[in-house]
Amino acid sequence: MINKGKLCSIALASAFLIFVILILISAAASEAQVTKIGTGYDPAVYGNRVVWTNGVVIHLYDLTNRTDTTFSSSGASSPDIYDNKLVWHDESSGTPRLAVYDIPTATKSYITKNVDQYSKPAIYGNRIVWSENDSVYLRDISTSTQTKIGNGSNPDIYDTKVVYYSYSEDPEVDITIRMYDINTTERITVNSYGDPNIPHIWGTNVIWSDVYNHQGYIAMYNTSTKKTLDVTHQLDTDPDGNEYGASTGTHIAIQNDKIVYNKCVDDYEGKPGVYVYNISTGQSTLVYEYPEEVYTTPEVYNNTLVWGMDKNYVDSTAGNDIYLCDLAA
């Protein structure tokens, strides 16, 4: 027999929790000068433009005039932007493919070869990288040439360098972060310690999440100095013997001197929320505080920080807003 009184109390408790979360978000927004700019998932930012999707529509938001342009693309996910080009994973035809959209001409084309349901594109200049079935591909959209460049997944690209996760390419170790040089076609191992995943690259810095414990921590390798350092804390214990660390690896991004990430627990390392790490000073700053176990997807370009909710942790359409913060302000 169903206990209606218990169901009612659970519903009231859930409503109260949502109310408290909204109050906390409102307070954080007023302090950090955060603006809601839309609703959806997977935001990316470049220059004065932010792109995201709600799965049916692609949003292109202009930061200069505060206008939101939309165009239909059912089955859209994981958009990325560079200059006047957008790319995203598209399943509007029922078959996985990558869409390439030119903003000035409003024209769309598709990449269909070597694409599966897990392919997430990253773009830099005229080059796009993605993975399919443990293979990493590079396509030059200016020449329509496509090449397999490695064995792995989750690639990212900066200029002539591509980084990716691999468990099968280096015969000396099992799990690695690899880097491919487009000019020389040389591949090197950047890191093979722990359980490195989700690599990103900007300039001479490569970052990744080491997810050996809990939600992982962030490490960084500098290709010039050949040195590796921990950006956030590995799993450790505080002076009182409480466990902390390994709570910052769920979503990371890098651009110039900034690394942005989500922290999902309240511990000795800091409060949960959206953070910015300054590479030059080695300091992390909490930009926007959330309750525990809230997973966000921050991205950054210059002083523009954007984020949404990780759709893997959202059970409904509620709470999937896109936020913007001007770090210069």
Image: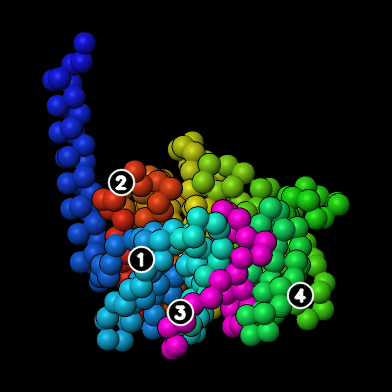
Amino acid carrying label 2: it is Ser
Provide residue 221's location: percent of width, then percent of height.
67, 66
| Label 2 element class | loop
Q: Nearer the viewer, mark 2 or mark 4?
A: 2
- What amino acid type should be assigned to the residue bearing mark 4? Asp
Q: According to the image, label 2 marks what residue?
A: 316
Q: What is the residue that sits farthest to the right in this orientation? A: 171
State the predominant SS element of the stretch in magenta: loop
Observer able to see residue 288? no
Decide: is 250 above or below 279.
above
Stretch in magenta:
104-128
Asked whether the residues under the numbered discs 1 and 2 touch, taking CB atoms below 8 Å apart as contact, a structural biologist would say no
Q: Is mark 1 on a helix, strand or loop?
A: strand
Disc 3 or 4, which lies upstream in sequence? 3
Residue that mark 1 sits on: 57
**Would you name the residue on which mark 3 appears?**
46
> Amino acid under label 1?
Val
Q: Can residue 148 be seen at all in this image of the molecule?
A: yes
Q: Which amino acid does label 3 sit on?
A: Tyr
Which residue is more in the foreground, 127 or 265?
A: 127
Find the distance from the CA under tag 3 to the CA under tag 4.
Answer: 24 Å
**Residue at (49% x, 39% y) in the render:** 243
Res. 181 mark:
4
Q: In which quarter of the image is residue 197?
A: bottom right
- The percent position of residue 283, horizontal first and vertical second, equals 48, 67
Label 3 sits on a secondary structure element that is strand
Between label 2 and label 3, give the one nearer the viewer.
2
Please give the label number shown on residue 303.
none
